[in-house]
Image (cartoon, rainbow, N blue to C red):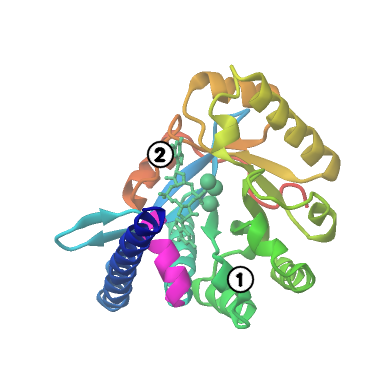
């Protein structure tokens, strides 16, 4: 009886797997078409100085509007893009477009706005990465100090020796490096000494109840104290309420982003936010 149940369970599992595999394959093919048909665009979420409220930078976030299917969430297609390697050309496009946009805003009279771009594991491992970043800065004319690359702890910890060398080369271009979703990885903190890191982005799971949950408050204040000692900047992600904003500002968090300020929005809407709150300070490179 047990064996039979097990057998059925396995058969069910195998069927599930192939359904998932089929879905992946379909998505992969659609992604290939999406690259060709230019179905991607970027939204930008402003990052605010928590003392002055000024916008000091934006994070570029990819959007895929698949004709007839509507928006497909990055959390759904980025992993497939990553596994298939398609993230490399997609990521290149993201970086190029984000730099172009940031430079364009500045050319049309906005204060210099930093732009943060998410970099995936596969992209970080690309031996051509440094050359591609340099080419991107060259072709768009963007000041390298205005570009920030967001990497997660697990990406940089996969191969620490190579990461250190690679991060240094990125830094040598004048580009800043931030650790995204900080606090959610399983890595030791020692990498903060080994790697040239400019900014820690406190994960939104710690920000969520920071003003009411003593544990989250303790974690966030500890991160802030540590970052101050190490002279690393901090960006809090996922600020949704005035209470969270106030808590973070009071405890010396430099920069924040989240729905409280704005959702990620198309470039034209983002420009309107700049007009309301002109930038005064640069988001990136503050600690250097
Ligand atoms: P992430 O880099 O940690 O980006 C933050 C995510 O949190 C974004 O989701 C953003 O819309 C969302 N968010 C921002 N503020 C709030 C808030 O106050 N509350 C809540 N609940 N959510 C908030 P999104 O755009 O769906 O992106 C999800 C993830 O997909 C990103 O997480 C990033 O890991 C990845 N991703 C997005 N764009 C790119 C890209 O161009 N390249 C790569 N490699 N990954 C990307
Ligand atoms: Mg990010
Ligand atoms: Mg993040
Ligand atoms: Mg996150």
248 sits left or right of 233 in the view: left
Q: Nearer the viewer, mark 2 or mark 1?
A: 1
Determine crowd level at label 2: few under 14, some 14-19, many 20+ residues with C-alpha closer than 10 A.
some
Residue with the mark numbered 1: 124
Based on the displayed image, in which of its 4 quarters is residue 41 positioned? bottom left
Q: Position of residue 12 (x, y in %)?
A: 31, 60
| Depth check, front residue: 276 or 179 | 179
Residue 102, relative to residue 86: is it above or below?
above
Q: Which residues are magenta?
A: 74-87
Mark 2 C-beta closer than 8 Å to ligand 1: no
| Depth check, front residue: 86 or 27 | 27
Q: Secondary structure at mark 2?
A: helix
Based on the displayed image, in which of its 4 quarters is residue 52 positioned? top right
Q: Position of residue 29 (x, y in %)?
A: 28, 76
Q: Secondary structure at mark 1?
A: helix
Residue 144, relative to residue 282: is it above or below?
below
Determine crowd level at label 1: few under 14, some 14-19, many 20+ residues with C-alpha closer than 10 A.
some
Residue with the mark numbered 2: 273
**Residue lying furthest left:** 68
What is the magenta segment's predominant secondary structure?
Answer: helix
**Residue lying furthest front:** 1
Mark 1 C-beta closer than 8 Å to ligand 1: no
Q: Position of residue 277 (x, y in %)?
A: 47, 34
Tell which circle, 2 or 1, labels the residue nearer the N-terminal end: 1
Residue drawn at x 78%, y 59% is 196
Residue drawn at x 61%, y 20% is 213
Residue 196 visible in the shown view: yes
Q: Position of residue 94 (x, y in %)?
A: 44, 66
Q: CA distance from mark 2 to mark 1?
A: 32 Å
Q: Which label belongs to residue 17?
A: none
């Amino acid at each position: 009886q047990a064996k039979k149940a097990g057998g059925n369970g396995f058969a069910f599992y195998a069927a599930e797997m192939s359904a998932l595999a089929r879905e992946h394959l379909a998505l992969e093919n659609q992604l290939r078409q999406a690259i060709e048909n230019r179905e991607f665009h970027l939204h930008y979420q402003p990052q605010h100085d928590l003392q002055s409220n000024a916008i000091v930078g934006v994070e570029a976030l990819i959007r895929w509007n698949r004709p007839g299917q509507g928006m497909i969430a990055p959390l759904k297609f980025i992993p497939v893009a990553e596994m298939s390697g398609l993230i490399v050309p997609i990521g290149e496009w993201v970086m190029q477009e984000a730099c172009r946009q940031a430079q364009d805003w500045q050319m049309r009279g906005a204060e210099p706005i930093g732009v943060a771009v998410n970099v995936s594991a596969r992209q970080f491992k690309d031996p051509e990465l440094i050359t591609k970043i340099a080419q991107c800065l060259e072709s768009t004319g963007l000041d390298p100090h205005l570009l920030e690359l967001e990497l997660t702890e697990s990406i940089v910890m996969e191969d620490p020796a190579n990461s250190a060398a690679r991060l240094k080369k990125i830094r040598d271009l004048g580009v800043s490096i931030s650790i995204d979703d900080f606090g959610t990885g399983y890595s030791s903190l020692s990498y903060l000494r080994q790697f040239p890191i400019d900014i820690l982005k406190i994960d939104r799971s710690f920000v969520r109840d920071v003003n009411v949950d003593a544990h989250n408050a303790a974690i966030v204040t500890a991160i802030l104290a540590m970052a101050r000692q190490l002279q690393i900047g901090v960006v809090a992600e996922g600020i949704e309420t005035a209470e969270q904003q106030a808590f973070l500002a009071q405890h010396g968090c430099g920069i924040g982003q989240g729905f409280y300020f704005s959702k990620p929005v198309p470039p034209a809407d983002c420009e309107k936010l700049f007009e309301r709150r002109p930038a005064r300070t640069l988001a990136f490179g503050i600690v250097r």
